Image (cartoon, grey):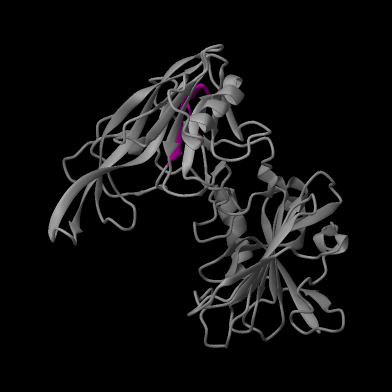
Amino acid sequence: MVVEVGYAQAWDLKSRSPWRPISAGEASERDAAGLPYVVVYREPGRQAPLEVRLVSWRDRYVGLWVYDAQGRRTYDLDMRLLDDPARLMRRYTVDWKYTGPEMPEFDEACPRITVDLFPDGRGRRTEESRGKGGGSYVTSPRLGEDERWMDRPAFGGWPLLSARMHGLTAPPVFEAAAEVAEAVEAAEAAESGDTDAPATCWRPPRPAQPGPINELFRPGVRVTDGYHPEMTVVEASRVGTLRVPSGLLAVSGPDIDHSDGPHITVPVPPGTYVLDEARVRYSYHCMWDDAEVTTTAPTAVRLRVSETPAATWEMALGSDDDPRLFIEDQIAGFSTDGATGCFADAGAWEPLITLFERGLIRGEPDLDGFEGLDDSSMFMQRTWDEASGGELMAFATTGDGTYPVWVGRSDAGQVVAVVVLVEGMPELLPEQDGFTADA
């Protein structure tokens, strides 16, 4: 079987076509420089590609997308370059099982199998039936070393990795795809400086992004959570202060095993810092009163290290978090089994957590170093260590799971705030005519 091989700077997801085709020579130069490019494998006379390989060595990433005759993506393979430059780890796969040729691409009812693998041998295989009455079945994948890792081929030496999926039994014969006019246009555009791929083009996977965190603390900003069509940010509510004499802030779930200490720590200057809550006001129809009701609700909790506004936000990582392994929109953060998080002085972590457990979980009466707070705030309990002066403030989240911790930095790179979103990131609504939110 003859397979045509073509190269491009990017792959357009909307049109399912290469963006700015390039020669094999230019693709080789981009490969050596670590710049992103794609390789497209086609069978002559077949409209949809057999597979598209997406390469970005600077991001330690190689992806593989397999397409069926209907032009639907049927398989994703996410590979990562880690410590050994000669080997690639098969990090993550998604296998869509379309039930017929009429089923749309990525249909919600389409069964699928995902496999999540890690360098230490751990992994998870999830089989989702989806559709009406569907469910999921999770197991540990039993894969050999050769199924988790593959040797890194040299440029031009890659096989057709999807050959078996397309029913090919003999090795294909590769031929260079015909040159097209877009290649000339791409060269001319590059000379003019117009080299940025449009938003519809593929890019390497990114972890979850912070979103408009600053706006959640600016009164008058309009947002929506997808359920309530319009919510208005009100003045942040100051709850109290937190002493961090050690200069190391802990952000964690206080209700899980802490034998290794808090999962997230953030260095801050030793001091006492304000804790506040972001809140929104919205109206909804109350079915019990059969009337329109207006209320307020928290969206985030914040420890303010400085009055300087954050210029950038970044997701805090734990010691076991490896950003080289993050798939698209993946989060890192603290986990909770009791819908609870906390800010604390990491230097006094053990005595503070012990007091928290004795006061909240065991319910010891008249316990020194522990107090419950009123129910008007997301913050619930406070503990303090007399020996060090360190404190802990526990707050409620809206459920169990993992919550990312966002660190705000000034233009100079200094930490100015640490935020946990307790309701997920709302979406900004357009500002109304004549309105300017307070800074």
Q: Quadrant of residue 218?
A: top left
Please report the residue visible at 55 percent of the width from the left and 47 percent of the height from the top: 193
Q: How many marks are shown on the rendered structure?
A: 0
Q: Nearer the viewer, residue 410 or 388?
A: 388
Most frequent secondary structure within the magenta stretch: strand
Left or right: 76, with 354 as reference point:
right
Please report the residue visible at 78 percent of the width from the left and 50 percent of the height from the top: 119
Quadrant the C terminus occupies: top left
Q: Quadrant of residue 290?
A: bottom left
Look at the image and say whether residue 419 sits in the magenta stretch.
yes
> Residue 252: x percent and y percent?
54, 35
> Residue 410: x percent and y percent?
47, 24
Q: Quadrant of residue 163?
A: bottom right
Look at the image and say whether residue 385 sits in the magenta stretch.
no
Q: Nearer the viewer, residue 65 or 336?
A: 336
Left or right: 53, with 159 as reference point:
left
Left or right: 396, with 387 as reference point:
left
Quadrant the N terminus occupies: bottom right
Q: Nearer the viewer, residue 344 or 226?
A: 344
> Residue 387: x percent and y percent?
56, 11
- Residue 157 shows up from this direction: no
Please report the residue visible at 50 percent of the width from the left and 76 percent of the height from the top: 107
> Residue 51: x percent and y percent?
69, 72
Left or right: 158, with 49 as reference point:
right
- Residue 370 shows up from this direction: yes
The segment highlighted magenta reads 407-421
